[in-house]
Image (tube, rainbow, N blue to C red):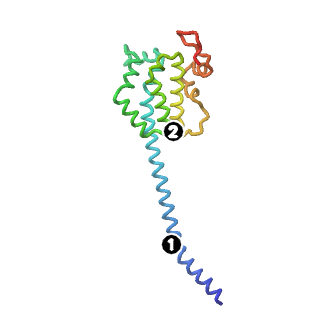
Amino acid sequence: MEEKQWIDYLSAIGSIATPFLVIILSAIGWRLRKGIERRTELEDKLRNDRIEIYNNILEPFIVLLMSDEAWATDKKNKNKDKNLHATSTMLSLEYRRQGFKMSLMGSDDVVKTYNDLMQYFYDEENQKAPSRVKEMLKHLGSFLLEIRKSMGNETTKLDQWDMLEWWMSDARKMKNGTFKMEKSEEPVN
């Protein structure tokens, strides 16, 4: 008889506690869902901001690496030196602002590879090195690869040279060390 009474008490407590437990679990689930939605929304906004910043940061490199003929086809570029334009863009206050924004919003790896790329440009010894073009492109390819990863392609199988091949005809030759400089017959390693 005493055993039946104990089961009745347990059953009564369970009947009373069940609605409270359901309410508490529902509230926790709602808070978790709202947190995930908010994070997703912020990540989407950040992604759009990052795309704009990355485009602005990459623009001078695109100009530097485009052919003179392609540069000249745009009427607003007539009689303008593309190298001077790219260099002055990189030295501008607005470019520095974009770099600052990227350092705040970009992933750690994006910021690190951008730093490597810019440090390569700042080092005057690199300006004289025969393998300058290959090294600069390697840094640029690494930067592009990290941007790709930060945009959601974390498991990409591409390497820095793969990031350059679609717009650069000699990327495979540079990667394999068979590219020859125009002014020199020595291969770039």
User: Element under label 1?
Assistant: helix
Q: Position of residue 164 (x, y in %)?
A: 55, 25
Image point 61% across, 87% down: which residue?
Answer: 5
Numbered circles on residues, count:
2
- Closer to the camera, 180 or 171? 180
Q: Position of residue 33 (x, y in %)?
A: 50, 57
Image point 53% across, 28% down: which residue?
Answer: 141
Give the residue at mark 1.
Answer: 20
Mark 2: give few (<14), some (14-19) or many (20+) Cα within 10 Å: some
Determine which quarter of the picture holds residue 12.
bottom right
Q: Position of residue 117 (x, y in %)?
A: 48, 28
Q: Amino acid at mark 2?
A: Met
Give the residue at mark 2.
Answer: 151
Mark 1: give few (<14), some (14-19) or many (20+) Cα within 10 Å: few
Q: Is residue 181 above or below residue 112?
A: above
User: Element under label 2?
Assistant: loop
Q: Position of residue 69 (x, y in %)?
A: 46, 14
Query: For the residues marked 1 and 2, what is the alpha-carbon distance in whole angstroms?
Result: 43 Å
- Closer to the camera, 66 or 76? 66
Residue farthest left in this picture: 93
Could you tell me which quadrant the N terminus lies in? Answer: bottom right
Q: Is residue 114 above or below residue 167?
A: below
Would you say 105 lies left or right of 161 here?
A: left
Q: Amino acid at mark 1?
A: Phe
Q: Decide which of tag 1 and tag 2 comes sooner along the chain.
A: 1
- Closer to the camera, 167 or 154? 154
Q: Is residue 128 above or below residue 141?
A: above
Image point 55% across, 79% down: which residue?
Answer: 13
Could you tell me which quadrant the C terminus lies in? Answer: top right
Residue farthest bottom in this picture: 1
